[in-house]
Each structure stands twice: as C-alpha cells, then as structure tokens.
Image (cartoon, rainbow, N blue to C red):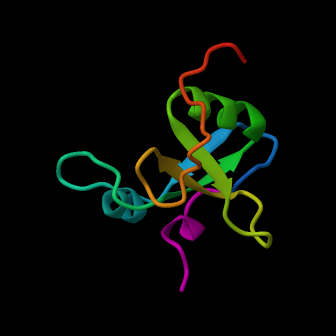
Amino acid sequence: MRLEWEWGVALNAGVNGIYLSRTNLDAAFDDNGQQVKPLMARLTGNVAGVEKLFDRCGWKAESYSDTSPMLFKLLTAGISGFDNNHTGGDSSG
C-alpha cells in the first residue's frame, strides 16, 4: 500500500517541514476534534526542535519506522501509546 504523501513533494532532510496526509489527518480526529488514533507525519530538518515544540504543546512524536526515518507517529495525552511520564507544557527546557 502506498501512502498518499508518496505522490507529493520530494522530502529534503535539510529543510524544516511537517508533512501530513489529508486522509490520515481526517482519520486521526473525530467530528469533535478529539484525537482518536495516532496521526502519521513526515518530519524533516531540525526534528529535535520540532519534537521539543510538540512536547510543550502536549504532543509526543515517536519514530515510526527504522526503514523510514522521517516517518513519525504523533500522539496527544489520552491516546494509547502516550507516555504517562510526558511533561508537556513544561517551559523550563
């Protein structure tokens, strides 16, 4: 199965970017805007900086595949797989 974003722009590891599949975005949230399953995203560029930003906003980015290092699973609190030791909102870092 090919993913929707494989037909999009070429990813450049040197450019900061967050790439989402519209299909996956629609499936990850319910009609009330609550996340119901992980959101898959391609992250490029300064991924550590984006992960820090996500953490401050209550999100967690997990690497999804060793064979596709730019593919991440994005989770919010309350979604299965979210680390209970997560410290989102901590601005001390």
Q: Is residue 9 above or below residue 2?
A: above
For the view shown, which residue lies furthest in the bottom direction? Answer: 1
Report the span colored magenta: 1-9
Image point (50%, 34%), residue name: 58
Q: Is residue 38 left or right of residue 66?
A: left
For the view shown, which residue lies furthest in the front direction? Answer: 85
- Residue 72 is situated, as x and y percent measured from the top left of the image, at 63, 57
Comparing 76 with 18, the one in front is 76
Q: Is residue 75 left or right of residue 18?
A: left
Image point (62%, 48%), residue name: 61
Q: Which quadrant of the rendered structure holds the C terminus?
A: top right
Q: Which quadrant of the rendered structure holds the N terminus?
A: bottom right
Q: Please identify the quarter of the rendering in which residue 89 is found.
A: top right
- Residue 47 is situated, as x and y percent measured from the top left of the image, at 74, 40
Q: Please identify the quarter of the rendering in which residue 14 is found.
A: top right
For the view shown, which residue lies furthest in the left direction? Answer: 31
- Residue 24 is situated, as x and y percent measured from the top left of the image, at 41, 63
Does residue 88 belong to the magenta stretch? no
Does residue 6 belong to the magenta stretch? yes
